[in-house]
Amino acid sequence: PKIPAGLLKHLAKAYSSWHIALPLLQQNAENYPDESQWYDALAELYTVLGDRDAYYALWHRRAVHAETKSALSLEQFGAWNAAQSAYAECMNRWQAGEMALVNTPQPELTLWEEGIVRSAKSLNQ
């Protein structure tokens, strides 16, 4: 049976059953790649656990645009200034209505915003 992502996420957080919930969420993300609920739950759990590498790997699979993948790589390697510039460039191009970025999914837009904030915090700005 397909257990809802929200329920698995709740069970992982409330009962510390990360070791059970994460493989189930990962399997469902692979089996149902068009359903964003699995990726959202995984991203939140990786963030709560502080597993940044798994978070970046998840977003590398999920990201629609190559610019997002590039910014994620820069951030992962600690190039905070370049990552901040890459995220800001993505946001500026999206706001300008560039055709390649017009249909960007909402979670990816949120990732850009959060990436700018994470980079600024790491740079003590």
Image (cartoon, grey):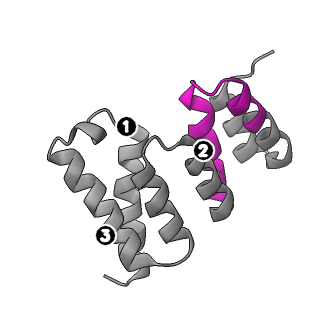
Residue drawn at x 74%, y 38% is 26
First along the sequence among labels 1 and 3: 3
Kindly indicate the quadrant of the structure image that contains residue 28: top right
Task: Give the image location of residue 3, x and y in percent.
Answer: 74, 22
Task: Give the image location of residue 52, x and y in percent.
Answer: 63, 63
Q: Amino acid at mark 2?
A: Arg
Residue 102 to residue 4: above or below: below
Residue drawn at x 35%, y 75% is 120
Marks 2 and 3 sit apart, C-alpha to C-alpha, by: 22 Å
Name the residue beneath numbered marker 3. 85
Name the residue beneath numbered marker 2. 61
Marks 1 and 2 sit apart, C-alpha to C-alpha, by: 16 Å
Marks 1 and 3 sit apart, C-alpha to C-alpha, by: 20 Å
Instruction: Look at the image and say whether residue 55 sits in the magenta stretch.
Output: no
Task: Give the image location of residue 41, x and y in percent.
Answer: 61, 39
Give whichever of 90, 28 is nearer the camera: 90
Residue drawn at x 49%, y 55% is 69
Q: Amino acid at mark 1?
A: Gln
Question: CB under 8 Å between callouts 1 and 2?
Answer: no
Task: Give the image location of residue 1, x and y in percent.
Answer: 81, 15
First along the sequence among labels 2 and 3: 2
Numbered-mark total: 3
Please tell me how crowded label 3 is: few (under 14), some (14-19), or many (20+) other residues with Cα within 10 Å: some
Q: Amino acid at mark 3?
A: Ser
First along the sequence among labels 1 and 2: 2
Give whichever of 42, 6 is nearer the camera: 42
Residue drawn at x 38%, y 48% is 110
Extent of the magenta region? 26-51
Name the residue beneath numbered marker 1. 106
Label 2 SS: helix
Residue 98, disc: none
Give whichever of 1, 64 is nearer the camera: 64
